[in-house]
Image (cartoon, rainbow, N blue to C red):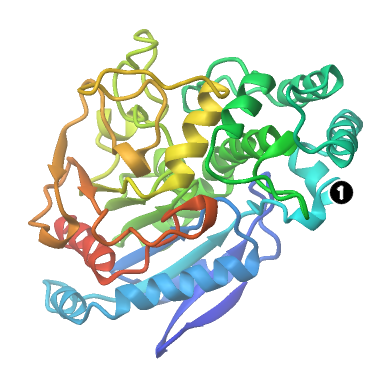
Amino acid sequence: MSQETVPGHDDLTYNLLNFDEQGRERGSGSREVLARAEAEQPTDLFVFSHGWNGDVPAARSQYGRWIATMAACAADRERAHDSPGGFRSLLVGLHWPSKAWGDEEIGTDPVVERFGGSPEARAAIGTIVDHAMTDIEPEVLPPEVVSAYEKLDGLDDDKSTEGDRVPFDAEQLYQGCRLEDDPVSFGSFGFGGILAPLRVLSFWKMKKRARTFGETGAAALVGQLQQAASDARIHLVGHSFGCIVTSAAAMGAARPVASLSLIQGAMSLWSFCSAVPARPAMAGHFRPLVANRMIRGPVVVTRSVFDRAVGTFYPLGAWSGQQLAFEADEWPRYGGIGVHGLHGPDVDVVEHQDVRALGELTPGKVHNVDARTVIATTDGIAGAHNDICHPELGHLVWQAVAASR
């Protein structure tokens, strides 16, 4: 564990805990956190989870900026301190291995490890990379490459509703990616070309890893924190795949958590519903969170049409490059909450049209908050997915905290 300072707020610290892909802690930092929680008895515990493509330096940077954003909301902090019982906080940032690869890493051991590290994964990735070195963008994928992708996909199949998608079709996905606006980088491996299905497939593999970590290491930690500080309110805040982590942690908690903030989530828009429209016999993976009232306060969800990571990668991976056709007044069969919000049967939803005009939040309800007015600055193929350090979003989380009291 490392105790980190927050940029611009030298009196404020958070605890950074490090876990492996199976949810096992690296080191023993959680013992120190639990000892602090037991000794200090905070009124409010905040647990943060980053999302896809985060190594330790990236996690440290994101948590520092995000917590600084919340700390800068002076009126909200004052309101919390003036509330009955006061306000004493303990902050924990979780790191789990979700780093995608850089172009220079293609074909190396770290990339193989992201697909399970088996000899089969190594051979399949080797075949794909060898063909990419010869011709990065053929008219159609060579049969050997198609076979290699099929083997990769079959090594770790995700049968849950949260992993629900049509059977992986590398050729359709490849052709779908060729229609995207991003040009192929011939000087290095870019988003397009033969490697495009590999990047999208890794997106879905990392999605399953987020759930595995949430159900194991993150859930265990939240349960232990609840025991160490029995009267504390626990607020879970996730970004991207971190929304899966925090949702899974809430499901595994010892008792209901206080609030759940899902910032630009890369998780299914049907995750909380009682019957997934395309599969009506099956409920959303995180349905128990609302059915069993496992979130005492509100669930807040931000969405932005400028989030290209959720808006493009999510449906591309789910539909394997097929066209997404649905009626204008319908939600897509496969879509992420970072663009669409949470929906479906028996989800009590309140829609907010502009994060800048946010009213009071209601406990026990899902609040879909359109944040396109602030989550708008694009950064490469991810679009505005990481544009989350705005005072309006800090205020949104503080509103969830206030509504959970």
Number of numbered labels in the structure image: 1
Residue 395 image point, x, y percent: 22, 67
With respect to residue 91, does 197 lie above or below?
Answer: above
Q: Is residue 300 left or right of residue 283?
A: left
- At a point 35% along the width and 39% down the height, the residue shown is 337
Q: Which residue is mark 1?
A: 109
| Quadrant, the N terminus | bottom right
The residue nearer to you, when weighing 256 against 186, is: 186
Which three-letter amino acid code belongs to the residue tagged 1? Asp
The residue nearer to you, when weighing 216 against 153, is: 153
With respect to residue 197, does 382 lie above or below?
Answer: below
Q: Looking at this rendering, what residue extends furthest in the top direction? A: 281
- At a point 62% along the width and 46% down the height, the residue shown is 183
- At a point 66% along the width and 53% down the height, the residue shown is 97
Residue 309 image point, x, y percent: 48, 45
Hey, which quadrant is residue 86 in on the image?
bottom left
Residue 242 image point, x, y percent: 48, 50
With respect to residue 69, does 158 lie above or below?
Answer: above
Q: Is residue 75 visible?
A: yes
Q: Is residue 154 left or right of residue 277?
A: right
Check disc 1: other Cα within 10 Å, few if <14, some if 14-19, many if 20+: few
Residue 387 image point, x, y percent: 40, 62
The residue nearer to you, when weighing 86 against 171, is: 171
Q: Looking at this rendering, what residue extends furthest in the bottom direction? A: 10
- At a point 68% along the width and 22% down the height, the residue shown is 170
Hey, which quadrant is residue 389 in on the image?
bottom left
Element on which disc 1 rests: helix
| Quadrant, the C terminus | bottom left
Hey, which quadrant is residue 58 in on the image?
bottom right
The residue nearer to you, when weighing 224 against 199, is: 199
Q: Is residue 261 left or right of residue 218?
A: left
Q: Is residue 38 visible?
A: no
